Image (tube, grey):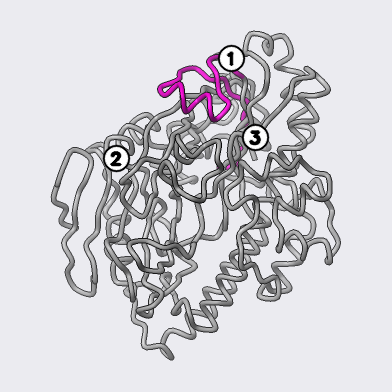
Amino acid sequence: MRLERESEFRYRMEPEGLMRVPGVVFASPGLLPEDQALRQVADVACLPGIVGASYAMPDVHWGYGFPIGGVAATDVGAGGVVSPGGVGFDISCGVRLLAVDLQRDRLRPLLERLMDELGGVTPRGLGGGGLWRVTGAELSEVLYGGARYAVRRGHGVPRDLERCEDHGAVPGADPGRVGDRAVERGLAQVGSLGSGNHFLEVQAVEEIYDPPAAAAFGLRPGQVCVMIHCGSRGLGHQICVDHVRVMGKAMRRYGVRVPDRQLACAPVDSPEGRAYLGAMAAAANYGRANRQLLAEAVRGVFGRLTGAAVELVYDVSHNLAKIEEHGGLTLCVHRKGATRALPPRHPELPADLAACGQPVLVPGTMGTASYVLAGVAGGEAFHSTCHGAGRSQSRHEAARRTDGRRLREELEACGIAVRGSSWRGLAEEAPTAYKDVEAVVAASAGAGLCRKVARLVPVGVVKG
């Protein structure tokens, strides 16, 4: 694909063929993705009703249909479509950051015991059970109410909802659109980490770039934090599978042509589009409840071992499609491997964060830093930014190049306690399998998508 460099961190791909809008890639030269991902940026630009551009964040890489790190909005009133590939299989995969009222130096004597207990209370790995074995009726409530229902049942405190995107539950959830197999997969996994790149990481605030914002978020230098990265588990995956199949059959009826069948889609206002959005919102609420349960387990461990209070900084998803108003239009904004970054004074922000903008949580991978960012005024791509470092190697390639046992030894030699589910799982998520998170954050901030608030470094990690 032909890219023209428009500025230091912005590249443009002019429309050609079936493309309805240009492609825009935010990146530095060293972060430009492989041709396969650029092809997907161009393919997304062919979606009916797409407006603005097909955007790619600095952590962009190849995915299913959409690239991971892709953002695209369609005009609902002009027949714009919704595509499950623009959300991904792990619906509402996201990040939750907890601030512990404890300094790093006080944690050192307790670290090994703390990590043992965190590893012991965190269900993880493929399949597996969860912390909350819900009944069918309770699962419906989870799908409707997300973290709100979890808090109502005693798994958290009301303040948690104030610091959670959508106050803990995406509106419009329709559990009736969730298939039987998805329900079956979801019953046993509420409050579980999963596998792959999901993790629970104990961190410390190493550097603060924006003191007023950090103070509003509840962060201070040297403070212990816990970051949780997970999503909607098997339930969300099954919903994506089911609705891709339905939309793939429905496209001809709506006269929709796309260059890749993985971009299966339907008009937002069609029965298929509404069914998917209702099921997607239900899966998103499952993901919010999932992280809420894991956060409560973390509170319990820190309470028993240190007596320290644990408060939620923020919880935000990076795999979601949302109906939003932009420029007087009602749009369906797909963010796949991209984080919404609301600017200061946005009406959806809680009052105590209004002056700062929305917190954005960008995890690194084992051994590398994570970042807390904030939304900025005038941010492009419908107020979106990066979601992580972005893979540079496939899991197979990473496992072939890395020895999990040696990696754990190297991390522990650097003072990072590791509790993994398998040696192969550790190898697949080695730091060398990802892009440089420092460069990704620099490009995101340099492109005007967000600004830096704080840098967090790992102390211990529980891997899925």
Between the C-alphas of marks 3 and 1, the distance is 25 Å
The quarter of the image holding the C terminus is top right
Taking the image as drawn, is residue 400 in sight? no
Marks 3 and 2, the one that precedes in the sequence: 3
Task: Work out whether residue 58 or residue 355 is closer to the camera in this orientation and state it.
Answer: 355
| Mark 1, residue position | 415
Identify the magenta region: 197-223
Q: Residue at x 67, y 45 (%)?
A: 161
Q: Nearer the viewer, mark 1 or mark 2?
A: 2
Task: Work out whether residue 415 or residue 455 is closer to the camera in this orientation and state it.
Answer: 455
| Mark 3, residue position | 312
Seen in the picture, residue 296 relative to 1 is either above or below; the reply is: above
Say which quarter of the image contains residue 297: top right
Taking the image as drawn, is residue 394 in sight? yes
Q: Does the segment drawn in magenta span residue 454?
A: no
Residue 448 is labelled as 2
Assign a secondary structure to mark 1: loop
**Where is residue 144 shown, x and y percent of the image?**
71, 63
Task: Work out whether residue 42 or residue 338 is closer to the camera in this orientation and state it.
Answer: 338
Task: Sort mark 2 into few (<14), some (14-19) or many (20+) by Cα contacts within 10 Å.
Answer: some
Amino acid type shown at disc 1:
Gly
Seen in the picture, residue 401 relative to 260 is either above or below; the reply is: above
Q: Residue at x 47, y 26 (%)?
A: 369
Between the C-alphas of marks 3 and 2, the distance is 27 Å
Marks 1 and 2, the one that precedes in the sequence: 1
Task: Work out whether residue 402 or residue 95 is closer to the camera in this orientation and state it.
Answer: 95
Assign a secondary structure to mark 2: loop
Marks 3 and 1, the one that precedes in the sequence: 3
Q: Residue at x 70, y 55 (%)?
A: 146
